[in-house]
Image: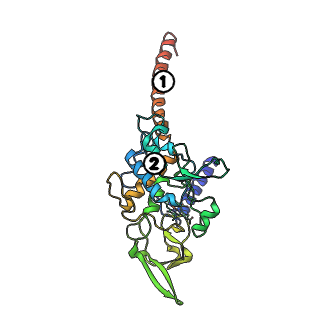
C-alpha cells in the first residue's frame, strides 16, 4: 500500500514537472508536414534531398559554420549524398573530387620552406573551416561563435525538426516595426503579425536588441523584452544568427524550387545524415537481426517440443 502511494506521488510529481516545463520556453519542434523519410525503424534518407542539403550547407552555412567531423570523402560513402556504386572507394569518385576541389584549404603539411600553403581540398581532407579558431569566429559574429554543425541534430532537442523550424521560423519582414525611442530607432516584432509560424503568438510587441534576432524555436526567455503581460511572453528566444534562408538563396542544380521551407528541409536532412552517416546500415542490420531472431525462436520452439514430447509436463 505504501509502495503504491509512493508510486502515485512520484508519478504526480513527474506529470507536474512535465507540465511546468511545457509552459514558456521555446516552441516545440514537430516534424515538417509528411514527416522525415529517415524516421522509423526502416526509414532511409532521401538522396536527392541530401544532395540539395549539401549545396545549401556549402553555399550558405559554410561561410560561418564548420563541420569538423566530416571529410569530403564521406559524401561519396554508401548512404551518402553522392554515393555512386561505380566508385566503391569514394576517393576515386570524380564528382566527390570536384566537390572537394571547390574548397581552398590550408594544407596540413608544410612546404619545402616550412610554410603552410593554401591548396584545393581532396576527398581525404576534412571540410574547410571558415575561421581559424573560436576567437576569430566570435569576433566576426557579434560575440557569438557559430557552433560546429557536425552533430548539431544530436545536440539539440528536436534534432532535424529543430534545425528545420529554426531556419524557417524567423518573423517575416512585415512583422517588424520601427519606433523612435529617445532619438534612437528601436526595432520591434509585432507578435500579432507572426502568422502561422509555430502556432499562437498572441498580441504585443517584442523589442529586438541590436545584433540579435528573434526566433520562436530558439531556447531563451523573451520576458524582459516583451511589452505586454509577462505571463504571456512569446515562446522562443534571441540569437546572433540573422535569417539565412531567403527565397531563392540558392539555385538548386536539380531544378527544385528553392523556397525557404525546401532549403530548410534539405539542409536539416543533410545535417541529420552527417550526425549519423551509418544510420541506414544500422537500420538494415537491425531488421536482419530481428528476422534472424524470429527464425531462431521458431526453431527453438520446435526443438523444445521434440525434446519434451515423451515427458508429461
Ligand atoms: C553569417 C554567419 C552565419 C551563417 C551564414 C549561418 N549561421 Fe548559423 N549561426 C550563426 C551564429 C553566430 C550562431 C550562434 C547564435 C547564438 O548563439 O546567438 C548560429 C547558430 C546556429 C545554430 C544553433 C542554434 C542553437 O540552438 O544554439 C544552428 C542549428 C545554425 N546556426 C544553423 C545554420 C544553418 C543550417 C545555416 C545555413 C543554412 C547557418 N546556420 C548559417 C551564424 C551563421
Q: In this view, does 307 lie to the left or right of 176?
A: right
What percent of the width, then of the height, locates residue 244? 45, 64
For residue 95, what is the image quadrant?
Answer: top left
In this view, the residue farthest toward the right is 114
- Label 2: element kind: helix
What percent of the width, then of the height, locates residue 5? 61, 51
Q: Label 1 neighbourhood size at 10 Å, few (<14), some (14-19), many (20+)?
A: few
Q: Is residue 141 left or right of residue 254?
A: right
- Find disc 1 in the rendering and name its residue: 297
Indicate yes or no: mark 1 CB to ligand 1 under 8 Å.
no
What percent of the width, then of the height, locates residue 21? 55, 62
The residue located at (39%, 49%) in the rendering is: 49
> Quick one: 209 or 207, which is closer to the camera?
209
> Can residue 70 be seen here?
yes
Tag of residue 223 = none
- Find disc 2 in the rendering and name its residue: 99
The residue located at (50%, 42%) in the rendering is: 73
Answer above or below: position of 179 versus 148: below
Real-space Cα separation, disc 2 to disc 1, in angstroms: 49 Å
Marks counted in the figure total 2
Looking at the image, is mark 2 or mark 1 nearer the viewer?
Answer: 2
- Label 1: element kind: helix
> Can residue 46 be seen here?
no
Amino acid at each position: 500500500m505504501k509502495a503504491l502511494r509512493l508510486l502515485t506521488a512520484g508519478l504526480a510529481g513527474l506529470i507536474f514537472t512535465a507540465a511546468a516545463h511545457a509552459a514558456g520556453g521555446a516552441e516545440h519542434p514537430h516534424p515538417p508536414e509528411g514527416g522525415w523519410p529517415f524516421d522509423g525503424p526502416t526509414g532511409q534518407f532521401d538522396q536527392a534531398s541530401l544532395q540539395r542539403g549539401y549545396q545549401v550547407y556549402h553555399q550558405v552555412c559554410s561561410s560561418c559554420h564548420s563541420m569538423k567531423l566530416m571529410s569530403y570523402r564521406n559524401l561519396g560513402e554508401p548512404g551518402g549524398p553522392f554515393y555512386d556504386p561505380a566508385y566503391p572507394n569514394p576517393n576515386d569518385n570524380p564528382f566527390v573530387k570536384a566537390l572537394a576541389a571547390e574548397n581552398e584549404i590550408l594544407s596540413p603539411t608544410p612546404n619545402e620552406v616550412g610554410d603552410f600553403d593554401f591548396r584545393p581540398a581532396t576527398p581525404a581532407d576534412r571540410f574547410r573551416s571558415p575561421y581559424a579558431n573560436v576567437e576569430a569566429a566570435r569576433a566576426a559574429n557579434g560575440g557569438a561563435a557559430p557552433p560546429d554543425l557536425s552533430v548539431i541534430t544530436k545536440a539539440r532537442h528536436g534534432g532535424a525538426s529543430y534545425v528545420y523550424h529554426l531556419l524557417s521560423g524567423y518573423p517575416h519582414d512585415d512583422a517588424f516595426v520601427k519606433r523612435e525611442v529617445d532619438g534612437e530607432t528601436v526595432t520591434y516584432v509585432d507578435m500579432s503579425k507572426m502568422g502561422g509560424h509555430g502556432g499562437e503568438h498572441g498580441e504585443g510587441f517584442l523589442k529586438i536588441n541590436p545584433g540579435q534576432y528573434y526566433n520562436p524555436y530558439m531556447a531563451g526567455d523573451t520576458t524582459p523584452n516583451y511589452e505586454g503581460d509577462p505571463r504571456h511572453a512569446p515562446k522562443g528566444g534571441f540569437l546572433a544568427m540573422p535569417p539565412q534562408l531567403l527565397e531563392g538563396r540558392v539555385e538548386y542544380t536539380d531544378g527544385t524550387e528553392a523556397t525557404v521551407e525546401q532549403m530548410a528541409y534539405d539542409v536539416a536532412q543533410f545535417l541529420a545524415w552527417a550526425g549519423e552517416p551509418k544510420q541506414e546500415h544500422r537500420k538494415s542490420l537491425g531488421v536482419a537481426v530481428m528476422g534472424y531472431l524470429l527464425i531462431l525462436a521458431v526453431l527453438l520452439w520446435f526443438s523444445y517440443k521434440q525434446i519434451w514430447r515423451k515427458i508429461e509436463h
